[in-house]
Amino acid sequence: MKLNTNYLGLNLTSPIVPSASPLSENIDTIRAMEDYGAGAVVMYSLFEEQIEHESHELDHYLSLGTDSFAEGLSYFPEMDTYKTGPDRYLEQIRLAREAVDIPIIASLNGASPGGWTNHARLMEQAGASAIELNLYHIPADINVSGEQIEKRYLAVVNLVREAVNIPVAVKLSPYFSATAHFANELCKVGASGLVLFNRFYQPDLDIYRLEVTPRLQLSSPADLRLPLRWIAMLYGRVPADLALTSGVRTYEDVIKGLMAGASVVMVASELLRNGPSRIQDMLDAMDLWLEDYQYDSVEQMQGSMSQIHVADPEAFERANYMKVLKSWRDDPMGASI
Amino acid sequence: MKGTPAKLVTMDGNQAAAHIAYRASEVIAIYPITPASPMGEFADLWSAQDQRNIWGTTPRVVELQAEGGAAGAVHGALQSGALTTTFTASQGLLLMIPNMYKIAGELTPAVFHIAARSLAAQALSIFGDHSDVMAARASGWGMLFSNSVQEVMDQALISHAATLDTRVPFLHIFDGFRTSHELQKITMVPDEVIEALLSPERIREHRARKLTPDAPVLRGTAQNPDVYFQARESVNPYYQSTPERVQSIMDRFAELTGRAYRLFDYVGHPEAERVIVLMGSGAEAVQEAVEFMADQGEKVGAVKVRLFRPFSSEHLLAAIPETARKVAVLDRTKEPGSAGEPLYQDIMTAFAEVASERTMPTIVGGRYGLSSKEFTPAMVKAIFDNLSADRPRNHFTIGINDDVSGTSLPWDPSFSTEPENVNKAVFWGLGSDGTVGANKNSIKIIGEGTDLYAQGYFVYDSKKAGARTISHLRFGPEPIHSTYLIQEADFVAVHQFGFLERYDTLAMAREGATFLLNSPFGPDEVWDRLPRTVQETIISKNLSFHILDAYKVARDVGLGVRINTVMQAAFFHLSGILPSDEATERIKDYIRKTYGKRGEAVVQKNNAAVDAALDHLHVVKVPSKASSSIDLRPPVPAAAPDFIQNVTAAMIAGHGDDLPVSMLPVDGTYPTATTKWEKRNIALEIPEWDADLCIQCGKCVMVCPHSVIRANLVGEAELATAPEEFKSAKATWRGYDDARYVLQVSPEDCTGCKLCVEVCPAKDKSRVGHKALDMVDQRPILEREQRNWEFFESIPPFRENLGGDGAQAPSLPFTKVKDVQLLQPLFEFSSACAGCGETPYLKLLTQLFGDRMVVANATGCSSIYGGNLPTTPWSQNAAGRGPAWSNSLFEDNAEFGLGMRVALDKQVEYAHELLPSVIGPNDDVESILKADQESPEAIDRQRDRIDAIKKQLKGIHSPAARDLESVIDSLVRKSVWIIGGDGWAYDIGFGGLDHVLASGRNVKVLVLDTEVYSNTGGQASKATSLGAVAKFAAGGKATPKKDLGMIAVGYGYVYVAQVALGANDNHVIKALREAEEYDGPALVIAYSHCIAHGIDMSKGLQQQALANSSGYWPLYRFDPRRKEEGLNPFQLDSKRPSTKLADYIYNENRYNILRKTAPGIAESFLGQAQKFVDEKWARYEALAGTPSGDGGGPAGPQSPPKPGPQRPAGLNPKAVRPKGMPPGGLKRSPGSS
């Protein structure tokens, strides 16, 4: 069965790609993911803040208390070199590049135009096959409009695009007034792929300690629906490869993503929960399914259920709203509004 | 090597010595001691980085548990044929002496590099003199002195070459701080020269003498009267030939480098009539003065002694011109009771031995420079003047005013020999503002980037929080010999505006000098903000006055309070040493060199600071008249006692040098309760109390490392005289319904560490970011809070004022933080680091037992913030009682405390014997002897009874009555606390600690465990945990932390507790009280977060909590008394680990740094460390689950030993029996109560 797919101009042996997660912090795990059939690996993210913050933090703690007291003029040995966030990250790309044959997609996370975007070039030099630019920003400033934010994002994409010769995919949030328009704008400034969607890690409140507690929550199956819809609606309408991410737990989810129009389906929470061998489980099951349902290849099904290809395009739009609400009575567990 | 271009570098003496030692050694044994520690740190770091010696192999560096151990390891390595070295100073050298006799006795080539330092006598001092090396002069080691940083590098090599050539081991000596820490531009000794000087043949001979079973020999025999003497004499030829051999090596060195040395180097007029002989850095100042005076035609000269042992009279006599009629021999040491100091005696002997052949000059001896006391050309001039007298004063001192014995020579401070072409700059900074670091860079920028020579010397005060630094920088076209502080500066920078009111910062400015001030006030406003003295000085000295708001610039570019590069840029611009553009370029080069490895972002923000600095630099137009109404503040308030006014205040103001001998206590005894007079006013923000929100839990009071937050209960009526803004709240103690709770911050003693705010649990329900304590700007509320603090201090201590309803109020048990907060701390306002993790434990101890505590304090952080002059935090209550404190040494603290205990026990015993016989058996005596001293109130009653007896004793005229008077106070129960850090308890003092715990005596040990040698800059101890990076463990510590608690538990009769304030504060109180109550040895190990952990100190308590919840630091108590009740003595007081070790350790730079340098190793260490924690937890859990009395486990039943004399009947065991303990308590031997 032909499971290969094309994403960002890269020929991948399978459509399942582990998305940015701590799994890629370990080279052995990256190797395992390749062995289990991952088409590519998106590395964990290097954050705009991390690039500067680690450096500042190291400087702060190495300077703290120094040259103050005659007996202890410093508190740490002064080493020749320190690997701060970017150094370690680039080293990890190099190691991953050496360890596996599948493409390594570097992930750069930030939101404001600045020097940090130069790290895309360093990522390319370290051996990344593509850059996934994660535009993660909480637009909390009441003085900043959506238009301004979109402009800023486009500027960032442009900077990264200019910094490298490898393809750039943009991972974005679902919170735009005009998602389709903005997706298209991203393509105009050079995005070769769109990854839908990133998930903002929402803080929790501890009502006993009266503290805000940042807590990572893995995705759930319900999270699949939102990207599924947008993949289906953007497929064929924007000149970019699409990747679906969020809520993928089974081979059926992968198939749904592909049918909606994704070139690849990304998975992280499921692998964090049950290990990288889940890739193989899903691929095996998919293989059987394709055989059972007489598909020749992944390519054959890709976008087959996108909005432009389904019989009922309205199913993805407002007209479907009432239908879904009514469906609650019949299948409360299945509804997601 | 001739023809090899000389490489010029800028470094200090320690680095120069370490460089040669490392290049010329195979094995290096290390142990930290100021000021020699950096040599060991360099060696460890280079070894961790796999840097090679000249033979292409990496020296192995091993840290020992003490200097004695280091010497032993050196001895062993030498016996095994390795080229071996070590570094030490002061008491460390004393601990090496036994092995030094052995090494010399066996004619073994070795070099110890010594940053010479004072010995602890009436007081410890970390500063430089020759007391230590003089104590080692009889050991048979060669002693070669270096006087400058260049000489250190050169003579370090000459020492290594000489020892191989002569088989006589060598001490290579240079002055602590003055040379060990002075930055100088020097010429590197290239590897080819090292190779050329270290004879391969001699090295092979050394190796051939190694102990090996392949050619077995016996060494280290015991000898009898028949041969020992002859054997000792057998080495004479080696010593006799050594001086010539050393000179030959010096000559060879001169051939190779062009730098010539003589065993005794003469400088000055060739026909000098007056000559000074001395060794060490002072010789540089003498040389400068002699050359100046000789240029003026004076017939003066100086002999710089390099090879002090073996002493060559022949070479000495050859060095001194025949014309010399008067000779002054200067010793940087004191040998009380001697005929004269060592060098003086040797010179006298040398001349006396040739008296028949050569006219004996008049020779006098003098002492100078003890503990880095300044030694200047002006003093040299005074010594020459003394020699001009018909009968020069002998056994004189110079540099002090000895108004007791009249030994001191007067000198004219205005006499200066400094060359005119030297540019001199002085910088006043705070430790935290980066001034010293920037100045070190400036030295390198100029030293390595221009043809100028450069010198940097840095003076620190003894505080850890808010420390003041003064940098002295010189730049000139010739090598700089001025081994003394700058007296007339061309440039004075004051980096802290507040200094202007506290110190006479411009005293060092010369006429027409440039004055740069970091000022929050602009050029139009600043003049009126200056103290009058400062205005007058600016006018009278015609200073060029410039200002810069460096904090604003630093803040704007993200540097926080690090104003170093901002001020540095302004210095270069104003000083004109380099063209401005070139200076900027070079500053940026050094920013990259210094910070580049920390990341580009740090480089960028420092560069931004440089660029912004000059835009904010303003020249200030100086009016013709001073107009200010403010002036320098007195160092202490007028209310301070006489001693504080007359002595302590001078030290605080930086005028301690001016104190005459008569003002100082003869035996090193100083008053306690003195920090309260030294208002340092260093916090920019202090906590402000919201009385309505407060839940009165006391946690803030408990954690405050500086005892600046105090709580009390008062009656409503007492508040009538309170300042209007004084806050109070209705007390929440049962039975104290009418009382008011008051909480007050001492605004001028706070360091702004924020621990109190972090620990405060009381949040505003409508605005959770607001707590009962919030940090606020200090300035606007300072005066108000000063008034409030003054009123708070006037409130009687809690115990004498039991709340609003007086006598009806119930007595509080003081077992919880809630209650203990009300007790007066007798440890206050220490100079520990802001947010210190140690001091809250000490404060707590004094709240519980302070008025009857005796403290034996090991050397370390706690002895420095506890006992470093000018002031001490150990305090007194209104009755004048408080902890009595002393420090003996680093290594013997447990034994020191044991001695205190034994003496107290003996006094109790003697008082018991005397009391019935002197007073007669009566009810009063009986009640004293059988007093219940279980509670503070009971102890007060005992004190009253004893006071009554004392009155009676006044009327009894007998020797026995006088004796009883002198010991009767011992019948009030005393608490002996042996306190120290992990360096002491786990390493150097462990043998003694183990013995003292094993003794069964009633001593209490508190280990303030910071897991490193904090005081000396964070070197690894055996308390350092696996994977932590520390100095001496630059590659991460590869072995787990030693489990000191379980070693003590193994005895079965030692009370042991492991505590952490941030994990469970009430548990700490419980453990300390149980330990104190236990009639036997007790050990409490307290987790103490530390600046050396690389943490946000305000989060120290959270880190303690994580240490606990990760299972790394389980809380437990092992109470042997529980066995009597059939209970398991081991109680594990922590819940099962709920967080991963990584979540705890990776909040700390000491662990993170390894992830940044060796991520693979860090990961491996983490795995091992987690496993170790899991295993340890399982062991503890098993121990806690093992029922007592079943004979199993390490904590099985075991009778306590019978410690010496038993506690006399007056100390009723019932009195110290905790609630719930059976009356039998601890089993006693017959004859005890």
Image (cartoon, coloured by chain):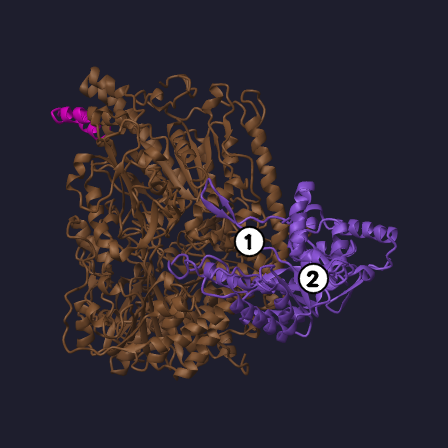
Residue B1037 appears left or right of B1097: right
Q: Chain of mark 2?
A: A
Compared with B807, B181 (above or below) is below
Nearest the viewer among B1080 and B188 is B1080
Give the tally of numbered discs: 2
Q: Which mark is residue A189?
A: none
Compared with B702, A81 (above or below) is below
For image coordinates 42% across by 78% down, the residue present is B446
> Residue B84's spot in the image, x, y percent?
55, 58
Helix, strand or loop for disc 2: helix
Chain B on-screen colour: brown
For image coordinates 63% across by 70% down, the residue present is A186
Helix, strand or loop for disc 1: strand
* Residue B884 falls in image quadrant: top left
Residue B427 appears left or right of B1071: left
Compared with B1182, B224 (above or below) is below
Q: Which mark is residue B62?
A: 1
* Residue B582 falls in image quadrant: bottom left
Q: Which mark is residue A233?
A: 2
> Residue B19's spot in the image, x, y percent?
51, 66
**Magenta range:** B947-967
Chain A on-screen colour: purple
Mark 1 residue type: Val
